[in-house]
Image (tube, helix red, strand yellow):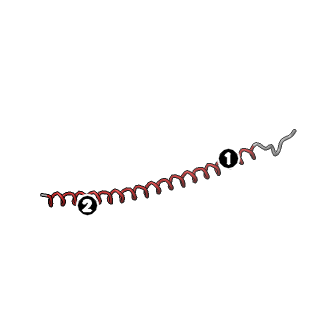
Amino acid sequence: MAMNLRLDVMDMENNHRSCCNDLAIVNEKQERRVRYHETRAQNLTIAYLILLGIYTMAISHRSSTSLQCKNCII
């Protein structure tokens, strides 16, 4: 009976270690996914801001040149 109890305890310890290893692997994969998506979101945000800046500069340049009076009689 004591031998069976020891085997049960050893099996439980092995199962616990196996579960901990599995959880560590899952945790590592999730952290990699989070880093990937975080980097992707940052890159998309930077690209959006750059394009917004270019678009804003183009509009402001066009509107400032169209407001100038080239053939005005004063």
Residue 67 in the image, given as x and y percentages of width and height: 76, 42
Please tell me which residue is depicted at 79% across the width and 44% down the height of the picture. 68
The reply to whether dot 1 and dot 2 touch (C-beta < 8 Å) is no
Q: Of all residues shown, which one is farthest toward the left?
A: 1
Residue 12 in the image, given as x and y percentages of width and height: 23, 57
**Disc 2 crowd, CA 10 A, few/some/many (<14, 14-19, 20+):** few
**Disc 1 crowd, CA 10 A, few/some/many (<14, 14-19, 20+):** few
Quadrant where the image shows the N terminus? bottom left
Please tell me which residue is depicted at 54% across the width and 53% down the height of the picture. 42
Q: Is residue 54 or residue 23 the one in the foreground? A: 23
Q: Which residue is mark 2?
A: 14
Badge 1 amino acid? Ile
Quadrant where the image shows the C terminus? top right
Please tell me which residue is depicted at 67% across the width and 46% down the height of the picture. 59
Residue 62 in the image, given as x and y percentages of width and height: 71, 47
Badge 2 amino acid? Asn
Q: CA distance from mark 1 to mark 2?
A: 67 Å
Q: Is residue 53 left or right of residue 14?
A: right
Q: Of all residues shown, which one is farthest toward the front?
A: 2
Q: Is residue 10 or residue 46 the one in the foreground? A: 10
Q: Nearer the viewer, mark 1 or mark 2?
A: 2
Q: Is residue 43 left or right of residue 57?
A: left
Q: Is residue 63 left or right of residue 43?
A: right
Quadrant hosting residue 2: bottom left
Please tell me whether mark 2 sits on a helix, a strand or a loop. Answer: helix
- Give the mark nearer the N terminus: 1 vs 2: 2
Q: Of all residues shown, which one is farthest toward the right?
A: 74
Please tell me which residue is depicted at 61% across the width and 52% down the height of the picture. 50
Disc number for residue 74? none
Q: Which residue is mark 1?
A: 59
Quadrant hosting residue 9: bottom left
